[in-house]
Image (cartoon, grey):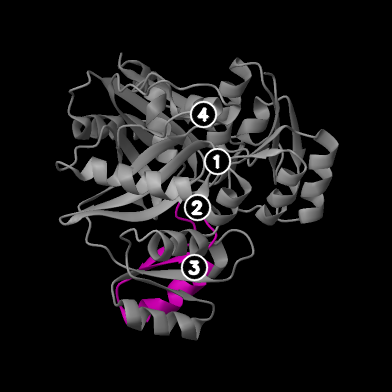
Amino acid sequence: MQKKIMLLGSGELGKEFVIAAQRWGQTVIAVDSYANAPAMQVADACEVINMLDGAALDQIVAKHQPDLIVPEIEAIRTERFYDYEKQGIQVVPSAKAANFTMNRKAIRDLAAKELGLKTANYRYAKTFEELKAAVEVVGIPCVVKPLMSSSGKGQSTIKTEEEIEKAWKIAAEKGRGDAEEVIVEAFVPFISEITLLTVTQKNGDTLFCKSIGHRQERGDYQESWQPAALPEGFEEQAQQMAAKVTKALGGAGIWGVEFFITADGVVFSELSPRPHDTGMVTLAGTQNLNEFELHCRAVLGLPIPEIRQEKAGASAVVLSGIETNNPVYTGWDVVCQNPQADFRLFGKEAAREHRRMGVVLLNSEPDADTLELQKQARELADKVAVKAN
């Protein structure tokens, strides 16, 4: 059962996946574009390459000959995955899924046009002139996102015509990978946003975690809580949509499927074929298996009989307010004074403004008010300071 796993992308989510995999006797090679990334600190081996360089990617795959390839980020030459599958390497969740979900255009067209899921009105643009035309069609306010990005990178909201040019520049500067196209989405008047962690298995039913509510700033999550309180029938709507899109993409693993909750129902937003940053709340012990353990079991083909919600929980990220190397932290002692709190320090060697450096975790009884837990988690996270060494 021991496998050699190549992890492409080695951030904080990858780090937790490596820990889960090693607990079950697996060997992990962590790959990223810079040395000593968080997952590299706990992996068996590591490689530093530009993953958009297909030849470099081929070289390390040939060198290590992994049994599985597990992508953690978008900036990868994912079309190579089809060749790796032909070589007998398991790509997680699948080469098709990785290629579709690493590009917003492919996944949005699949969801809206092929599967008929309810989404925001949208258009694409490759030039500034096309962006202006797209904004005219979908209307203001609207949201502009690079086709290849994550955690809100390069995303902005247009509220006036004067902001169109600024949005184009932000997308061009901060998008990931080499896709120069953007998606323009009509603004959805949502009540809240949720992530539905969905687990597809090799030999088992598709399973769902309880929905996770989250709050974002600058397109990046700040707090998440589980379970999220939803109107009657909305969770089932989200599950049906998530099951439909993950089945179309195929493969085994965990998916972070994002939805807008509106007065009229559930609207599909995005999905990621891997553990989701908002799902770090599951590290608070909210479930019998956290999202990283679920991902690991699914990709290894180990059975997952059920996912049980055992506690209510919340997470709040610790952001850096400064730019420094080898940062130090104060305030963790305050977090530890709360008997229901825990924390994770990601181990990033460089801090910059708004970069996620850690997360505070909080749990309580299953019927606890999760929005109150969110508030408490944020208050604790705000007591942690990132400082220059």
Quarter holding residue 159: bottom left
Where is residue 204? Give x, y as percent: 46, 28
Quarter of the image with the N terminus in it: top right
Q: Mark 2 points at which residue?
A: 150
Where is residue 264? Give x, y as percent: 16, 57
Q: Which mark, residue 251?
A: 1
- Count residues near mark 4 (Cα–Cα under 10 Å), then give few for <14, some for 14-19, many for 20+: few
Amino acid carrying mark 1 in the image: Gly
Range of the magenta residues? 143-171
* Mark earlier in primary sequence (1, 2): 2
Give SS at disc 4: loop
160 in the magenta segment: yes
Q: Mark 4 points at which residue?
A: 203
Rounded to the nearest angstrom, the CA distance separating label 4 from label 2 is: 30 Å
Give SS at disc 3: helix
Amino acid carrying mark 3 in the image: Ile
